[in-house]
Image (cartoon, rainbow, N blue to C red):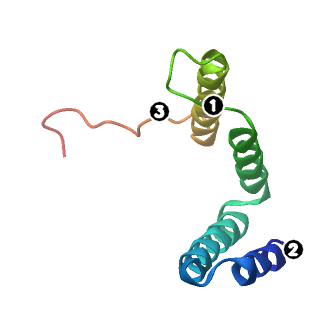
Amino acid sequence: MRALFTSLSIVDSPAGARISTAVFAAVTIALTLWVILRIGLLAAVVMFFVEFVLDRLPLTLDPNRLYFASGWATMAAVAALAAMAFWMARAGEPLFGRGKAVGSR
């Protein structure tokens, strides 16, 4: 389905932007397929959820905007989700591998 929409957007875009749109679409489709086939369906669902959230919520670095706090809260939630997923993926192992003592081989 995504490939159909991608091909329609390439046909509809102006002549100068068709190559860049096609390259972006190919990279997007390749990344999506890689995540689904290599990492798994749960990772793909989380990827689509995060993409949905980040696309639809206003994010800004300008502290004078009304939605400044909600943007930072959104980014904190995404970072917390990534940190929790990293912690769970380690499955009880130390977070950054087993360290070797200084001087040992």
How far apart in space, not on screen, are marks 2 and 3 (Cα)? 41 Å
Three-letter amino acid code at the position of disc 3:
Pro
User: Tags 1 and 2 in contact by the CB under 8 Å rule?
Assistant: no
Q: Quadrant of residue 60?
A: top right
The residue that label 1 is drawn on is 84
The disc at residue 94 is: 3
Indicate left or right for 93 with 8 as reference: left
Give the x, y percent position of residue 105.
Answer: 19, 46
Three-letter amino acid code at the position of disc 2:
Met
Q: Of the residues under marks 3 and 1, which one precedes in the sequence?
A: 1
Give the x, y percent position of residue 12.
Answer: 75, 79
Secondary-structure class at tag 1: helix
Secondary-structure class at tag 2: loop
Give the x, y percent position of residue 11.
Answer: 73, 84
The answer to which of 50 and 99 lies nearer the viewer is: 50
**Are there few (<14), some (14-19), or many (20+) residues within 10 Å of tag 2?**
few
From this viewpoint, which residue is outermost toward the left?
Answer: 103
Q: Residue at x 76, y 45 (%)?
A: 52
Three-letter amino acid code at the position of disc 1:
Met
The answer to which of 80 and 70 lies nearer the viewer is: 70
The residue that label 2 is drawn on is 1
Q: Residue at x 61, y 27 (%)?
A: 80
Report the mark closest to the observer, 2 or 3.
Answer: 2
**Are there few (<14), some (14-19), or many (20+) residues within 10 Å of tag 1?**
few
Indicate left or right for 10 with 102 as reference: right
